[in-house]
Image: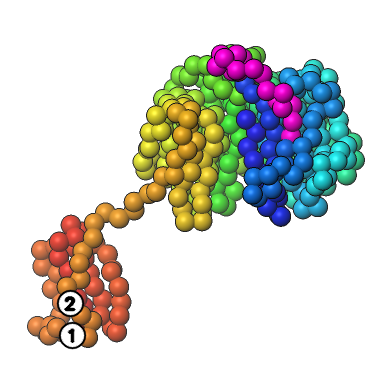
Amino acid sequence: VSSPKVGADGTIYFGSGVTDGAPAAMGLPTPVTSNTFYAVNPDGTEKWSFKTNDGDPNSKIYSTPAIGSDGTIYFGSREPDSRFYALDSNGNEKWSVQKPGQAIYSSPALSQDEKTVYVGIGNSIHAFNAADGTEPWSVDTGAFVLSSPKITSDGNIYVGSTGGTVHALDSTGTELWNTKLGTSVYASPAFSPDESILYIGDYNGRNSSAPGHMPAASNPSKLYAIDRQNGNIVWDFQAQGAVISTAEVAGDGSIYVGSADTNLYSLKPDGTERWRFSTGGKVIGSPSIDPQGRVIVGSRSAAMFMVVEDKSEWEYDLEYTFDTEAKLCDDRFHLMDFEVKDFVNFIDGWSDFVAANGSEIARLK
């Protein structure tokens, strides 16, 4: 369930843990590696592995690791181990902190200076000193924290809870604001390119007192855009299933998010829908955008998808050469009966204008 993180040298880090009852339901034995954290070489061979301190295979690792610039790896485990770990790049434990009886689903986040690491444990957000694991503060959110904290450039921390609330804290743990959304918030925050808007989804379905990473049922839920300064809701977008997926925001502000209604959605920055793509199964994980702008997402249809957006409306074949000058009737240009759509190019003083329906082209010196 843990998502992989890739280190500076290409090493792939992830935790292991099976969903409750899943092996038995499929007629399989419970994996003995359920409580193991792995480091894998780029060629797929195992570099090293680390088992939780209690050795109990039920101490699953759902938490996605955070990696410091010095190679330190941070992640948490579920009960009965209930520890938050810091390992060095060779898999040796630097320190760990146990919170007995508390499950860690949340993935940690490092402060800008990497001196502090934040993570959700049980019903609280905790701050740990990255050097030694001492705990300067924790804040009780009043409900289970499955969401992973995200930190903005000013050092503020944002996270959701299964009480349906988004919390904003400063680096000292002081609450700046909290905003109530739906029944529960499993997703983690994402931000607009300028960090002025926070995007996060809610989940209306499972009882918030029964935390889990996967909804058993799903009602219509929303993705919200929240003003990061004051917590006010700017807009919301209605999906037909839980929005557990954390949104991915492109450089142009386009928002991509999955839903348990099987769709991957693309939204404009104002919250209007650009398009949707059905995967045939619940989309619980979060989409990624590659350098070419292609969107990659997994689905409970047991498939991975790469979705390529076709941004063209039509094409027009330029059936002339640029070294041929056409005689204009005079020094005035008459557009006559068609609407100008756009420039196509500007070469050697000639501008090409295209009609809105793509059927005609005109040249202007």
Type of colouring: rainbow
Task: Report whether 258 appears left or right of 211.
Answer: left
Badge 2 vs badge 1, beta-carbon distance below 8 Å: yes
| In the image, residue 327 lies in the stretch drawn in magenta | no
The residue shown at (28%, 69%) is 344
Q: How far from the left and from the top, in percent, is residue 257? A: 48, 37
Residue 225 picture location, percent across and down: 52, 38
Residue at image point 54% right, 20% down: 215
* 299 up-or-down from 341: above or below: above
Q: Which residue is mark 1?
A: 324
Amino acid type, label 1: Thr
Q: Amino acid at mark 2?
A: Tyr
Residue 305 occupies which quadrant of the picture? top left
37 over 57 or under it: above or below: below
Q: In the visual, does 245 lie left or right of 29?
A: left
Q: CA distance from mark 2 to mark 1?
A: 8 Å
Q: Which residue is disc 2 drawn over? A: 320
Tell me the residue at 28%/83% (across/down).
349
Which region of the structure is painted magenta? 20-37
Q: Nearer the viewer, residue 243 or 165?
A: 243
